[in-house]
Image (tube, grey):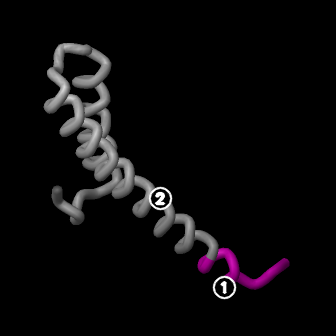
């Protein structure tokens, strides 16, 4: 998996894996693979959101209070 994916790209890949699982047409091995891939994409999304949150907090702290 590419750790350099943007949030939007990882979210799209996550959605693709979830749709495969929802369809119910996968065998056990393929379903397990889809779950593993979905977890990776979910982790990437979580990391990107956390990084954005930290940037917002830092910028908010750097601004003078009125």
| Mark 2 Cα shell of 10 Å, populated few (<14), some (14-19), many (≥20) | few
Indicate which disc, 2 or 1, sits on the residue closer to the N terminus. 2
- Residue 16 appears in which quarter of the rendering? top left
From the image, state whether disc 2 or disc 1 is nearer to you: 2
Residue 63 falls inside the magenta stretch = yes
| Residue 62 tag number | 1
Q: In this view, which residue lies farthest toward the right?
A: 66
- The magenta-colored residue range is 58-66
Q: Residue at x 26, y 48 (%)?
A: 9
> For the view shown, which residue lies furthest in the front direction?
28
Total number of numbered discs in the rendering:
2
| Element type where label 1 sits in the image | helix
List x then y, in percent, for residue 47: 42, 63
Mark 2 lies on residue: 49
Cα distance between the residues tagged 2 and 1: 20 Å
Is 40 drawn above or below residue 38 in the view shown?
below
Q: Residues within 10 Å of mark 1 (few under 14, many from 20)?
A: few
């Amino acid at each position: 998996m590419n750790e350099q994916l943007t949030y939007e790209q990882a979210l799209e890949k996550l959605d693709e894996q979830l749709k495969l699982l929802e369809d119910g047409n996968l065998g056990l091995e393929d379903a397990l693979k889809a779950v593993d891939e979905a977890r990776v994409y979910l982790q990437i999304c979580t990391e990107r959101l956390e990084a954005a949150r930290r940037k917002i907090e830092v910028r908010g702290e750097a601004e003078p209070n009125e």
